[in-house]
Amino acid sequence: MFHTPIVPRGRKRSRPAEASAPRREGVKFEDVRLYLVERKMGRSRRSFLTELARSKGFIVEDVLSDVVTHVVSEDSQASSLWAWLKGGPVKNLPVMHVLDISWFTDSMREGKPVAVETRHLIQVCPSVQTDTLAASPEATTPTPVSTVSRYACQRRTTTKNNNKIFTDAFEVLAESHEFNDMEGPCLAFRRAASVLKSLPWTVQNLRVTEDLPCLGEHTMCVIKEILQHGRSFEVEKILSNERYQILKLFTSVFGVGPKTAEKWYRRGLRSFSDVLAEPGIHLNRMQQSGFLHYGDISRAVSKAEAQALGNIIDEAVRAITPDAVLTLTGGFRRGKDFGHDVDFIVTTPQLGKEERLLTSVIDRLKQQGILLYCEYQASTFDESKLPNHRFEAMDHFAKCFLILRLEDSQVEGGLQTAEENRRSWRAVRVDLVSPPVDRYAFTLLGWSGSRQFERDLRRFARMERRMLLDNHALYDKTKKEFLAATTEKDIFTHLGLEYIEPWQRNA
């Protein structure tokens, strides 16, 4: 049993609101509020650590309440800790960090709150007892799980997601952890979702998942709950949480990421009208365009609309360079029927000729009167700086982020529009990237996705082959040489992998 601190004799017990207001002098980290669990730690050690943390500018709460952001415990019995936490009065438990003492000691050493990593987390699902669940009598015998790789680049996704009820839940949990800046759990849920998407059979009981890779204790808890109740109560709690709803709303705006959304939420803003009316908010050009065209660009883009945009870009490119190469990438290359934007790679057979291609395309789109927004980023690619030992989310090739006007008459079957909006045009987001032709295969592989497939492909290269892969190159650390590739198949061959078609990469 865990206990809140005992009030010393002779001191009046404060009301909860007062108890959660420790000394504020010298506070450096307003957004972080710690609660140290006394069990196993002991009262004297807890008091010492509390004073230590406060001396370094941390806020340490005396009582566990909803204002706490980080719960720190030395108790190795995770199940009893979670049972106590869930039985307590706090309502914001899903958004709290529940951590072992290693996070605290790391933070004290650094003199600031360190990023929460997977090794810091105390995660457990109480009462997960896979051995008590008998296999469903009507369940079919699945493919042996020994054939399922822990790398998405060694798994082929099926045309139909047989486990959508589970993967949708995992995506909500991953997004919730992303909003809380918890990269480890976010990646864990996305890896678990990726594994289930590759299964040609539906999970009908826990026993068939026992040897699947990337399914941790928390994900097994969610699967069990869905199997028993047809839903996840944890996911439902997240979906009904105001903060999650508002952050999801704000991040749906073009140019608004989780950090900006969190800042707006902390300022008390709860709607688009709040943001637009707030005099202290200064939107950049991308965000201004995001709000201006929100109704259009927040709506899905159809395959027919993507093809129509391909025709527009192709015409503009070939008017400048007739022998240019234009390729549709992203989700549409992976066979998706709908997407949020449309991505293209454009290059030229002659090395160096691609350098001014995008600026010329932008000028031509302006002349046609269909360019609603443009952000151009010139190439910063420097071959002498390869290989890059630290992965960067964005490559260094010339690229532009556009919003284009697409007419109904240009789309076979017409525009994908809402019933109440029968305009003759809509705004659509389009991204263009222009690598040198000798980097085309690496860029095509990287921009085709999916994000989880690419993440695991790079991880496989690093962990299993001692190679470094990104959108620029493939480097063999053993041979200390770059490996050339003109096609995606060349890259798979270098890595010793079977080639996986783009439409089988929806990990």
Image: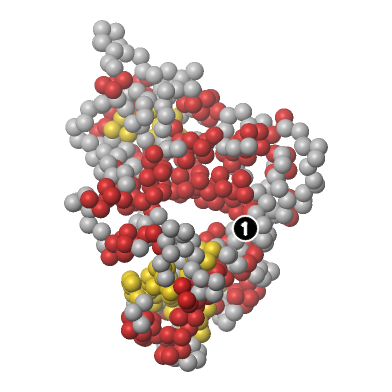
Q: Is residue 111 visible?
A: no
Residue at image mark 1: 151
Q: How far across and down, in percent of the image, does residue 208 sit?
A: 73, 43
Identify the secondary structure beneath mark 1: loop
Seen from the viewer's position, the closer of residues 88 and 159 is: 159
Residue at the spot 78% in from the left edge and 42% down from the top edge: 139
| Label tally | 1
Q: How far across and down, in percent of the image, does residue 458 sit?
A: 54, 64
Seen from the viewer's position, the closer of residues 207 and 492 is: 207
Which quadrant of the rendered structure holds the C terminus? bottom right
Left/right placement of residue 73 relative to residue 265 reads right
Q: Quadrant of residue 288?
A: bottom left
- The three-letter code of the residue at mark 1 reads Tyr
Label 1: few (<14), some (14–19) or many (≥20) C-alpha neighbours in 10 Å: many
Q: Is residue 378 visible?
A: yes
Residue at the spot 45% in from the left edge and 38% down from the top edge: 240
Residue at the spot 46% in from the left edge and 59% down from the top edge: 418
Up/down of 416 relative to 59, above or below: below
Q: How far across and down, in percent of the image, does residue 210 sit?
A: 70, 42
